[in-house]
Amino acid sequence: MSKRGRGGSAGNKFRMSLGLPVAATVNCADNTGAKNLYIISVKGIKGRLNRLPSACVGDMVMATVKKGKPDLRKKVLPAVIVRQRKPWRRKDGVFMYFEDNAGVIVNPKGEMKGSAITGPIGKECADLWPRIASAANAIMKLICAHDLISGTHSKFSLSDCLQGREGNDREETLSFLGIAVRVVVVDIGPLGN
């Protein structure tokens, strides 16, 4: 479990690949009028000498607006990362990544400043931030190769989808609301939980 603190979030999340260091610019995925966000710090990072603090899906960051409405620019605002391009591995063996990096502007309690989110958000973010999850159009939960190939997004378990297909990795593209999501299912051996 992660030891990094997040104000206003509910629960813990597993460790993920950190894809957004300080000084990264991400798209703003809400309807506040901001076009992009420039990350200046990551909440809950204790740090190590010469290591840049980095964020991933579900992390709260302090950011400034570089392009957008004049009343939002030149201010330090809290934001939550909802999508990242760097692949991360979920505990079930699925590697996920999004088409772009994106975040939403929030208040320190985690309540959104805007009222809508464009594009999907990661399940890790939705589990931690209930206010963001309620405003999201789509949440990327477990998607397995069988669902991608057949076009149905029903609730199959990963063991059902991988039965008889062990030994090879598969990579599929899925499009949610205009945002392409790459999903990689790797060979994780026999499933028995």
Image (cartoon, rainbow, N blue to C red):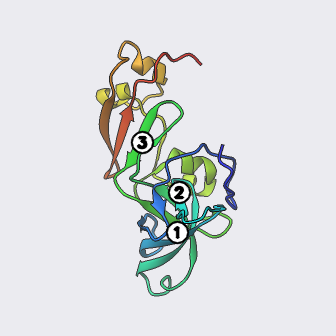
The answer for how far apart the CA atoms under marks 1 and 3 are is 26 Å
Q: Is residue 105 above or below residue 91?
A: below
Query: Does the rendering let one see residue 39?
Result: yes
**Element under disc 1:** loop
Q: Is residue 75 above or below residue 178?
A: below
Q: Which residue is mark 2?
A: 135
Question: In which quarter of the view is residue 185 placed?
Answer: top left
- Residue 177 position in % (x across, y down): 35, 51
Residue 107 left/right relative to 160: right
Report the quarter where the N terminus lies: top right
**Neighbours of disc 2 within 10 Å: few (<14), some (14-19), many (20+):** some
Kindly identify the residue that appears in the image at 41 percent across and 46 percent down: 87
Question: In which quarter of the view is residue 75 placed?
Answer: bottom right
Amino acid type of disc 2?
A: Ala
**Element under disc 3:** strand
Q: Which residue is mark 1?
A: 114
| Tags 2 and 1 touching, CB below 8 Å | yes
Q: Is residue 181 above or below residue 92?
A: below
- Residue 26 position in % (x across, y down): 42, 66
Q: Which residue is mark 3?
A: 96
Residue 78 left/right relative to 22: right
Amino acid type of disc 1?
A: Gly
- Residue 53 position in % (x across, y down): 55, 63
**Residue reaching furthest to the top:** 164
Query: Does the rendering let one see residue 116?
Result: no
The answer for how far apart the CA atoms under marks 2 and 3 are is 22 Å
Question: In which quarter of the view is residue 143 placed?
Answer: top left
Query: Which numbered disc, 2 or 3, marks the residue closer to the eye?
Result: 3
**Element under disc 2:** helix
- Residue 120 position in % (x across, y down): 43, 51
**Of marks 1 and 3, which one's residue comes earlier in the chain?**
3
The answer for how far apart the CA atoms under marks 2 and 1 are is 9 Å
